[in-house]
Amino acid sequence: MQTSASIAIIGGGPAGLMAAEAAIGAGTAVDVYDAMPSVGRKFLLAGKGGLNLTHAEPIDSFLSRYGSRRERIAPLLAAFGPDALRAWVNALGIGTFIGSSGRVFPTGMKAAPLLRAWLQRLRAAGVGVHVRHRWLGWNGDGSLRFATPRGERAVHADAVVLAAGGGSWPQLGSDGAWIPLLEARGVAVSPLRPSNCGFDAGWSKHFRERFGGTPIKSVVASLKSRRGGAFRLEGEFIITENGVEGGLIYVLSAPLRDEIAAAGTATLSLDLAPGWELSRLMHELSRPRGRRSLSGHIQSRTGLKGVKVGLLRELVTAEDFADSGRLAAAIKALPLKLVAARPLAEAISSAGGVAFEALDKKLMIRSLPGVFCAGEMLDWEAPTGGYLLTACFASGRAAGAGAIAWLKIRN
Ligand SMILES: Cc1cc2nc3c(=O)[nH]c(=O)nc-3n(C[C@H](O)[C@H](O)[C@H](O)COP(=O)(O)OP(=O)(O)OC[C@H]3O[C@@H](n4cnc5c(N)ncnc54)[C@H](O)[C@@H]3O)c2cc1C
């Protein structure tokens, strides 16, 4: 096909590749540039534990996962939402299924077959993929600067889609180095912060050594933030060497992180025995324990075992532990103080990024006509559950289509 203009896409993750797919086929040359030796590294890692593509819940609950950015994400998902994403995966020759929790996975759970089929289709459609091309900003003549193994290269493009990701797992390519490049151009960027991350709790040596790596199942965690928000969720998490991580913690990571930033600490209240009334616990624990140890007594009377009893021992004073009433109250509402979010590099995703206020409806940076943004580098966050990839794909599609539309108006 004869090409009359060119689009450069910076970042070959899900958002950038989707932008390429949306842009190719309109008579425009489309080239993807990525700093790493291969594209889609974080996407492939996401597939290691089972690639959770999207979620099958009703769209209203789905949109609620984007919190304060709901209004910004809604139009993107209206154009390319969870159902469209599943149909798109199917069209690549890969089936999808809904897991027991409503999470949607590709058949086989892995990202690699999907990425392979997708790259093949993109290349066949004419998309150029240039790896080991690290974007460094702009030259004075408006061309893009890339560091390559053969030295610096200047690329002229009529439109640009930036899809350089957030700041988690920087070893996979997305390291947030684009932030000063955009800030130097006056673009508002909210600092990157860890999202879907673990937290430090400051365990004792004994507890860390005995229970580090152990899952805690079926608890209800409540959080009342000092700024008024209240959360109450049932789920599981894992005791880590430093604190806690895992599904339940990730869902609460945004309010926990913001609470720590505002007040220095955040305190989760844990119900370790969700199926039990407080009165029944008190009754059972006040029964004679004979020659059993206190821990043995708790286990035999309440069924609480191992790590849950260990957690009580860790967090409750010896006096409260020995008092059946106070112990029962602690089992139903155990305060777990968290002192710091784990670093961004360890998080699953990032909060912060290019402010939506800096963009128009097609995701073009208002102050940089012809430059679009997509994916995790935008200022939104969501819990795990497929919400991250869904919004990355949808925003990539919008940015790619936006670039084509902009080129048409301009010519
Ligand atoms: C362990 C883990 C598991 C996950 N599991 C899931 C899951 O199951 N479901 C889900 O929805 N989400 C999951 N995620 C999150 C999901 O992978 C990301 O949200 C998604 O990959 C972000 O897509 P993106 O295209 O915006 O950015 P990225 O995938 O980060 O891609 C950005 C690309 O830009 C390139 N780049 C960066 N800077 C430059 C530069 N200066 N020049 C050139 N190229 C550059 C990078 O090399 C990279 O290839 C997981 C993340 C992790 C870390």
Image (tube, grey):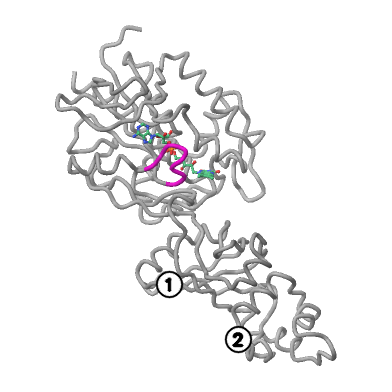
- Determine if the magenta segment contains residue 6: no
Eyeballing the image, is 239 above or below 315? Answer: above
User: Which stretch did the figure color magenta?
Assistant: 168-175
Eyeballing the image, is 159 above or below 386? Answer: above
Amino acid type, mark 2: Thr
Please give left or right for residue 355 compared with residue 238 in the image.
left
Q: Report if the CB atoms under discs 2 and 1 are less than 8 Å apart.
A: no
Q: Is mark 1 within 8 Å of ligand 1?
A: no
Give the spatial CA distance, label 2 vs label 1: 20 Å
Q: SS of the residue at dot 2?
A: loop
Q: What x and y, as percent, mark residue 380?
A: 37, 49
Q: What x and y, as percent, mark residue 115?
A: 54, 27
Q: Determine the main secondary structure of the stretch shown in magenta.
A: loop
Q: Residue at x 33, y 16 (%)?
A: 29
**Closest to the observer: 42 or 286?**
42
Q: Is mark 2 within 8 Å of ligand 1?
A: no
Amino acid type, mark 1: Thr
Please give left or right for residue 294 compared with residue 150 in the image.
right
**Closest to the observer: 406 or 267?**
267
Q: Quadrant of residue 326?
A: bottom right
Q: Residue at x 28, y 43 (%)?
A: 179
Q: Residue at x 62, y 43 (%)?
A: 49
The image's mark for residue 317 is: 2
Q: What x and y, as percent, mark residue 223?
A: 49, 71
Judging by the rendered image, the residue that carries numbered circle 1 is 265
**Upstream in the sequence, badge 2 or badge 1?**
1
Quadrant of the image containing the C terminus: top left
